[in-house]
Structure formats: structure tokens, C-alpha cells
Amino acid sequence: MKKLNFILLIMILIFALFTGCSSKGNQEQPADNNTSQETKEENKEKDKKLVMYTNAEFAPFEYFEGEKVVGVDADIAQEIAKDLGKEVVIEHIDFDSLIPALVTGKADFVAAGMTITPEREEEVDFSIPYVESVQNIISKKEAELKTMDDLKGKKIGVQLGTTGDLAVTDAINLDDGDLYNTGAEVKTYASALEAALDLMTGRIDAVVIDKLPAEEIVKNNADNLVTVKFGEISEAYGIAVEQGNTELLESINKTLQRLLDEGKIEEFISNHSN
Ligand code: GLN
């Protein structure tokens, strides 16, 4: 008899557990619906936004005007968003964190005067080229650093992770590099502006950075600084998207082609060059 009672008790417990679970499940159903409703709304909001990541220390392509990031790339981004019926949101981070931000899905695209290189193409997809550039040397007027030869034994500042960084590091480290074994040293900075400050105070002898940003820095310090070409290698800027995001890439390319055809990119450059 005792055994029977015990079995009965177990059966009641199992039943209670089962109905308990299922009723709990039923209660959660509407909550789940709410969440998915909310997620849908959130996604709709997200769908209207196009997130651009950049490093806003690269005038005329991107720089701060108060709290706002403006510049050639910001103007291009507005056009891309307009053509897609979306609104662009611009985030500023360090240059060498831009590709990781794309790869981890934080950004829809990166527009940062970024040179298309085979190494970067292994991680992201690039648009058609929209600007051509070369590397420039910035130095103090009286230093007369005019050629690669003049950089032998000098301390050279670069922006971390840029093509300027790569060019100088290779020139110093490769045994057929122009600055190999000359005592030349590379110093990396978060931005060319920070490097330029160190140049002014004499901590370094030169800064190597893209032509137009170099010219902007020199224009703002015209009494002290000069800039000349660093090398002959021509670089092309592209807008980067996550690999395989062909839909966005195609619309970016369409907008870029239209802007190039209309001469708008030249216009944006002259608007943002002071
Ligand atoms: N064009 C250079 C590069 O891609 C520098 C870009 C930048 O500093 N924003 O590395």
C-alpha cells in the first residue's frame, strides 16, 4: 500500500512538473512575441541607418567641425545614403581599428581615405577607386629634407597602420630599403596631427603621410613646415565593406561613379581644403 502511495505521489509530481512547464511556456509565448516585435522595430530603425566608420584626423577627407565629422568622405557618405534612402551615422575611431570594425560587423562601410592594398583586400572588399594619392614628407623649413636620401638617419613619424607607416618601415627594415642601416627610425602615432606636433617640438625630424592631408597640415603651419613628395608610388582610395556585401558595394560604386562623372569629388576636395 505504501508503495502504491509512493508511485501515486511520483505520478502527481511528474504531472505537476509537466503542466507547470507547459503553462510557463504558454505564459512566455506573448512575451516572446513582444520581444520579436521590439526586435523588428529595432531592426527597422537600424535598416534606415547606414553606419560609416572613419578616423576623423585626416583633413580634407575627414575632420571634426565641433562635434561633427565632416570632409570629403562624409560628403560622399551623405550621397551614398541619399541614393539608398537612408541616413548616415559617422563614428570616429583609430585608423588601425577600422578594418577590425568592419570585419566584426560594427560598421556598414569604412570611408577614411583608405588606400586599396592587396593585404587589406584579403580582409575587406573595396569600391572602385575615387581618389589618387602619393605619400609626402613633412619637415621643418630649415631642415631642408627634400628627398629620400635626406631622411637617412632621421626620426620619422607616421600614423599607425597606414600606407605611410608601411612605406617607411619597409624602407628602414628591408635590406634593399632606401633607409636600411642608415640609423633612420620610425615612430608611430595615432594620427598625423600628433606626429606633426612632435615635429614642431623637435622630437622627430619628419612625418610621412598622404599628400593632401600633408598639405593641410603645412598650410596651417606655413611659417614652419614644408612638404614634398616621399615616393613615386601612386595609391588609390576606396570605400571598404565587409567581404561579400555585394549589395551595398554595388550601390556605393554607383554613387561613386556618378560623383566622379559629375566632378563632385573634386568639388568636395576644394570645399574642404582651406
Ligand atoms: N591612405 C593611407 C592609408 O590607407 C592613410 C589613410 C588615413 O590615414 N586615413 O593607409
Image (spheres, grey):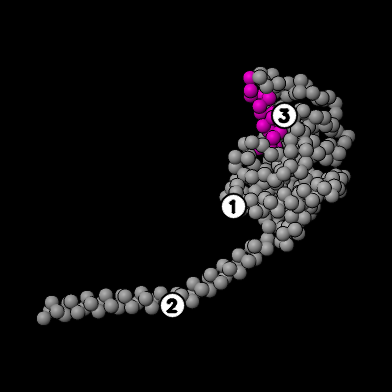
Query: Visible in this render: residue 117?
Result: yes
- Look at the numbered disc 3 and say if its residue's Cβ is closer than 8 Å to ligand 1: no
Q: Please say whether residue 80 is one of the residues in the magenta stretch.
A: no
Q: Which mark is residue 105?
A: 1
Callout 1, which amino acid?
Gly
Residue 246 lies, with reference to residue 162, above or below; the image says below
Comparing labels 1 and 3, the label whose residue is closer to the camera: 1
Tell me where residue 66 appears, x and y as whole percent.
Answer: 79, 54
Where's the C terminus, which quadrant?
top right
Q: Circles 1 and 3: CB distance less than 8 Å?
A: no
Where's the N terminus, which quadrant?
bottom left
- The tag earlier along the polypeptide, 1 or 3, is 1
Q: Which mark is residue 134?
A: none
Q: Who's the residue at 68% across and 60% down the image?
A: 49
Depth check, front residue: 81 or 114: 81
Comparing labels 3 and 2, the label whose residue is closer to the camera: 2
What secondary structure is marked by label 3? strand
Q: Who's the residue at 74% across and 42% down the image?
A: 129
Residue on which disc 3 sits? 156
Tell me where residue 214 appears, x and y as whole percent.
Answer: 80, 37
Q: Please say whether residue 173 is one of the residues in the magenta stretch.
A: yes
- Circle 1 packing at 10 Å, graded few (<14), some (14-19), many (20+), is few
Question: What residue span does the magenta drawing correspond to?
Answer: 159-175
Q: Tell me how far mark 1 sits from mark 2, CA to CA.
A: 35 Å
**Main SS, magenta residues:** helix
Callout 3, which amino acid?
Ile
Q: Who's the residue at 77% across and 36% down the image?
A: 133
